[in-house]
Amino acid sequence: MSATPSPRRRTPAPPREEVLAAAMDMIAERGLEKLTMAALGREVGMSSGHLLYYFRSKDELLLQALEWSEGRLGAERGRLLTRPGTARERLAAYVDLYVPDGHRDPHWTLWLEVWNRSQNADEDARIRQAAIEGAWHRDLVALVAEGVSRGEFRPVDADRFAARLRALLDGFSIHVAIGLRGTDREQVLTHVREFIAQTLVAP
């Protein structure tokens, strides 16, 4: 009598967050150019086809990884902005969180790649990218408005000032993330502190 063959067991796919965390780790350790579906699949024990089933494309994988990373940054930003202290102290913490840690900062490396790919992105992807930008902007507007109401900051239009400050932060942050010679994180933080002192802090 022949033995009945045992059914093949399907290896459960790792949770989505585990895959996204692995993608961010690969970007941090090896650079974005080494993040392929095949390499990520080997890292998490899935085939590249299986990954494509869940994420549809590499563009979608990158956007979801960015959203996951932004979710963690958003939680940290929320803690910083609700802690005790002056509006100026919390603004300094916001800026510190915004500016990349240095050349090839994984979050900014990913952000730049998603921005680059957004030229051909569909409407859904653009809406999701705008949501990420909007969260940073709304928090900054609220913080500036609070400082104005307390008399810590000059009576500026909070929305307009936030838009200009974020444009300054974005420009400097790109220089830091790509490793532009002569522009490091500390130099950028000094420039931004001087700009805030000259244009926002009440005399």
Image: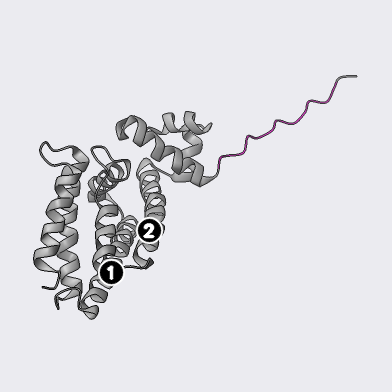
Real-space Cα separation, disc 2 to disc 1, in angstroms? 20 Å
The residue located at (24%, 75%) in the rendering is: 145
Q: Nearer the viewer, residue 104 or 195?
A: 195
Label ID, residue 173:
none
Secondary structure beneath label 1? loop
> Residue 49's x, y, as percent?
48, 35
Residue 52 shows in this picture: no
Q: How is the image coloured?
A: one colour
Secondary structure beneath label 2? helix
Let me know if residue 11 is in the magenta part.
Answer: yes
Let me know if residue 60 is in the magenta part.
Answer: no
Residue linked to disc 1: 86
Name which quarter of the figure residue 158 lies in: bottom left
Residue linked to disc 2: 74
> Residue 200's x, y, as percent?
14, 69
154 left or right of 56 in image: left
Q: Are marks 2 and 1 in contact (CB under 8 Å)?
A: no
Callout count: 2
The residue located at (16%, 71%) in the rendering is: 160
The segment highlighted magenta reads 3-14
Between discs 2 and 1, the one toward the N terminus: 2
The residue located at (27%, 75%) in the rendering is: 146
Would you call the spot at circle 2 few (<14 residues within 10 Å), some (14-19), or many (20 or more)?
A: some
Residue 202 shows in this picture: yes
Q: Nearer the viewer, residue 61 or 147?
A: 147
**Main SS of the magenta segment?**
loop
The residue located at (36%, 31%) in the rendering is: 29
178 left or right of 114 in image: left
